[in-house]
Amino acid sequence: MRRLLPLSALMLICHTSLAATAYVSNEKDNTISVIDLATQTVTDTLEVGMRPRGLLLSHDNKLLYICASDSDRVQVMDLSNHSIIKELASGDDPEQFALHPNNKWLYISNEDDALVTVVDVDSNIVMAQIDVGVEPEGMAVSPDGKWAVNTSETTNMLHWIDTASNELVHNTLVDQRPRHVEFSNDSKRLWASAEIGGTVTIIDVDQREILKTMTFEIKGVHPDKIQPVGIKLTDDGRYAFVALGPANHIAVVDAKTWEILDYLLVGRRVWHMAFTPDQKTLISTNGVSGDVSLVDIDSLKVTKSIKVGRYPWGVVVTP
C-alpha cells in the first residue's frame, strides 16, 4: 500500500526546492529586488546604478555583476553584505555580458559604440575591444570557454569571437533584431532569439551552420506581439524556454526534437529567465506588469507571481 506524505512534509519538500535567493534588476527604479524563494517574498531592495539590466553571478556565487547601462559601468556587488565593492571599465552603455569559465574574463556588449569590451575582473584591465555590428546586445560564452558570441540588433548578426585571441572570426546572419544567445550545456548548440523576426535560430557550434529556425504561434495573440528575447536551456538537454516579450508567454520547447510543447502565460512583457539551482523552478521577469513569475518545471505550470520594482529585466538565482 502506498503511503502518502503528510502535508507538512510536502511543504518542506517544496520549500527545500526553493531554498534560494533571486536578484532582479528593475531598470526604471535603479534597484535590485532580493527575493527569498522559500517564502516567496521580497526581502530587500538595493539601490544600484542607473537603468540596471543584465545580471550575472561569479562562478562561486559570491559576487553579483550588474550592467548599469545608463551609468556606463558594470558594478560588482559582494553578496555577503550587498555592498558595491568595485566598478569595472565596461565601456559605454553595457547591455548584457558573459563570464568566461575561468571566472576572470568578462565579455561586455557596448550598445552605443558597436563594441565588445573584454575586462579582467580581478585587475580591472581592459584586455580587448572588438568591433562588432550596430547595437550589440546579447552576449554568451560557451561552457568549454572557446567561444564568445555577441548579437547586433541592427546588423542582424551573431559575431563569433575566439576567446584565445579575442579576435572576431565569423559572422552569422539571422533574423531581425537578435537579442539573446544561449549555449547548450555541452557547447555543441547555440540558440539565438530574433525579437522583430519572431524566430529562434539553432546553430551547430563546430560548423557554425544554421540547423533550424523556429517560429511561434499562440492562439489569440497577434504575430507582431510574438517577440522572442530571453532563452534558458536545462542542463539535462530536455527543455528550452523562450520568453516571447509582449506576447506575455513563455514557449516550452523540446530541446532535442525542437518541437514546441506548450505556451505558458506569465506577466506582461516577459524579458529574461533564470533557474533555481536544482532546475525545478524557472523565474521570469515581466517588465510591464512589474513582477516575476515562478514556473514549476516538472508540471510546466505557473505557480506564483511576485511583485517587484518597475520594469524588471534581468534575474539570477543563488543557492
Image: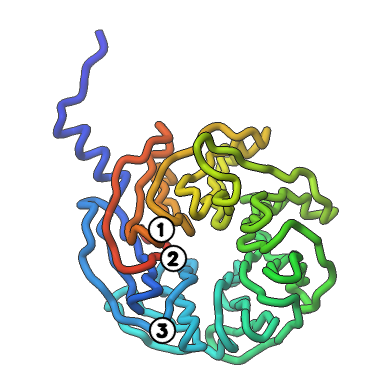
| Residue at disc 2, secondary structure | strand
Residue at left offset 25%, top offset 73%: 45
Residue 180 in picture, x, y percent from top left:
61, 61
Q: Is residue 66 above or below residue 143?
A: below
Residue 212 in picture, x, y percent from top left:
76, 43
Residue assigned mark 3: 50
Residue 238 in picture, x, y percent from top left:
57, 37
Three-letter amino acid code at the position of disc 2: Trp
- Mark number, residue 313: 2
Q: Quadrant of the N terminus?
A: top left
Rendering quarter of residue 85? bottom left
Rendering quarter of residue 127? bottom right
Residue 215 in picture, x, y percent from top left:
67, 43
Q: Residues within 10 Å of mark 2 (few under 14, many from 20)?
A: many
Residue assigned mark 1: 285
| Distance Cα–Cα, label 2 vs label 1 | 6 Å
* 176 lies left or right of 280: right
Tags 2 and 1 touching, CB below 8 Å? yes
| Residue at disc 3, secondary structure | loop
The disc, 2 or 1, on the residue closer to the chain's N-terminal end is 1
| Distance Cα–Cα, label 1 vs label 3 | 18 Å
Q: Residues within 10 Å of mark 1 (few under 14, many from 20)?
A: many
Residue at left offset 28%, top offset 77%: 46
Residue 318 visible in image: yes
Three-letter amino acid code at the position of disc 1: Thr
The disc, 1 or 3, on the residue closer to the chain's N-terminal end is 3
Residue at left offset 67%, top offset 63%: 177
Q: Compare residues 72 and 215 and report the one nearer the observer.
A: 215
Q: Residues within 10 Å of mark 3 (few under 14, many from 20)?
A: some
Q: Is residue 136 above or below residue 258?
A: below
| Residue at disc 1, secondary structure | strand
